Amino acid sequence: MKAITVTQLNNQIKSIVDSHFEIVYVEGEVSKVVYHNSGHLYFTLKDESSSISCAMWRSNLAKMKFKLREGEKVLVYGAVNVYTPRGEYKLIAQTITPSGIGALQKAYEQLKEELSKLGYFDEKNKKPLPKFPKRIAIITSRTAAALQDMLRIAKKRWLLAEFYLFNALVQGENAADDIALKIKLADEYVFEDGKGFDLIIVGRGGGSKEDLWAFNERVVADAIYQAKTPIISAVGHEIDYLISDFVADRRAATPSNAMEIALPDKNEILLTIDDMIENFRFKFLNILQKKEKNLIHLKELFVSHSPVKKLDMKLDEINVLKKNFYILMDGILRKKENDFTNIKKSIELASPLRKIEEYEKEIDLLKNQFTRKINEIIYFKEKELNSLKEAFKRMNPKNREKEGFAQLRIKDKKVSLNDIKIGDEFFVENATISILSKALKVMEN
């Protein structure tokens, strides 16, 4: 047998394909859709066992009335073409028509409905996220760019958390089982202090529906639902919604967003602390000012009600009354002097000798009455003084005693002379002297 070149082989295959598959009508599920800048459409058509690369040129694409999306099941009418330089074949679509949803999308919706009925998505089953997590488990691939994005955001937001990576497959045939296993390991992990993780983040970066499908598997949903540790699902981009997003305690739009949800912002915390310090300082100063006012008020009350203050107030009142008395008396005397002067002037101007005499008599009478009144007052005051002196003399113990008389006392009891017996010790005393005595002999007079 004569050997042929690779090009010859590819040309022979192309000739066979072109002759046998000039027109084909194929049904399958769409994935990996790419609308190229050139205007052409590239996608993959697949079923449960196989897939084939497809393309639609710009001229035919312009005639389509809908936009192709991943997961859709479609009917493709076209021809199989072999690209000889690389030995690749591709289905060149001329028309594409919808044929219901694809198998993956259908499986997704069926599982979502089943888990919803079981309560996997109920808010009452969601665990609250810790406000200040100390230990966080990250379940993703160690080579994923999403891991570095998460750590970068964490470094900016909060430096007090510790992160532990559970390296896991995030796509492929065994990815779902591996992710479920790592969730269980992280949930059951116990540190030396007897505590576990405060939070678990499960996720990966963006990709096609097939790339993200592990997070739509039942085994992953069960692991998330059964975990006792709060879990954030952070898979793909914001537009991607996976079964893990609905089961988890919190969904993050992206892996970076998961860190924004999980960790507090240190700048916000610092601003909050500053506000708290300022509020504390304001309230403390306000309380201090109120207490100071109360203290001043109490001090004023104490001063105003103290005996010294009251005595000073009475002295002030006496001084005011005394001053007012002198002013009043001075005014009266001045008025009388003025009246007398006016009368004298009137008399001098009119020269009424009779009235002068009458006035002089009246003045003498007033003088006599005044003198008599003064003498009368002095007499009664002297009499009162003498009465007080007499009363004082009468009440003075010294003056009440008679010459030669004294009082007898045994201990604290007053006794008479008849009560004294031979040998008794007793006091003989008056108002100024007390003499301790002893009875040697008792004689009757």
Image (cartoon, rainbow, N blue to C red):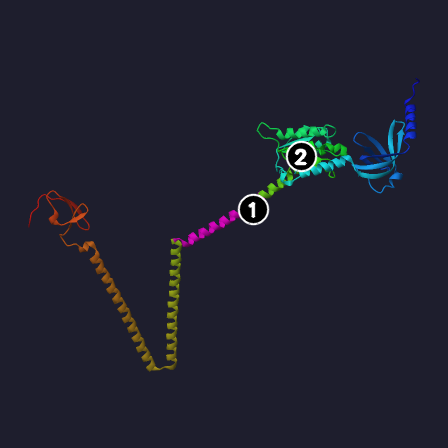
Give the prevailing secondary structure in the magenta stretch. helix
SS state under label 1: helix
For mark 1, does the 10 Å Cα neighbourhood hold few (<14), some (14 to 19), or many (20 or more) residues?
A: few
Whether residue 54 appears in this view of the structure is yes
Determine the CA span between mark 1 and mark 2: 34 Å
> Label 2 amino acid?
Ala
Quarter of the image for residue 347 reads bottom left
> Label 1 amino acid?
Phe
Q: How many marks can you see?
A: 2
Residue 276 x/y as whole percent: 58, 43
- Disc assigned to residue 282: 1
For mark 2, does the 10 Å Cα neighbourhood hold few (<14), some (14 to 19), or many (20 or more) residues?
A: many
In the image, 1: left or right of 141? right
Q: Is residue 116 magenta?
A: no
Q: Quadrant of the N terminus?
A: top right
Residue 341 x/y as whole percent: 38, 75
Please report whichever mark, 1 or 2, sits nearer to the chain's N-terminal start: 2
Residue at the (75%, 37%) spot, across then down: 106
Q: Which residue is mark 2?
A: 154
Task: State which region is magenta.
Answer: 277-306
Which residue is nearer to you in this view: 197 or 208?
Answer: 208
Camera-side mark, 1 or 2: 2
Residue 149 x/y as whole percent: 71, 33
Above or below, 168 against 112 in this view is above
In the image, 372: left or right of 244? left
Whether residue 257 appears in this view of the structure is no
In the image, 311: left or right of 267? left
Quarter of the image for residue 346 reads bottom left
Which residue is nearer to you in this view: 63 or 345?
Answer: 63
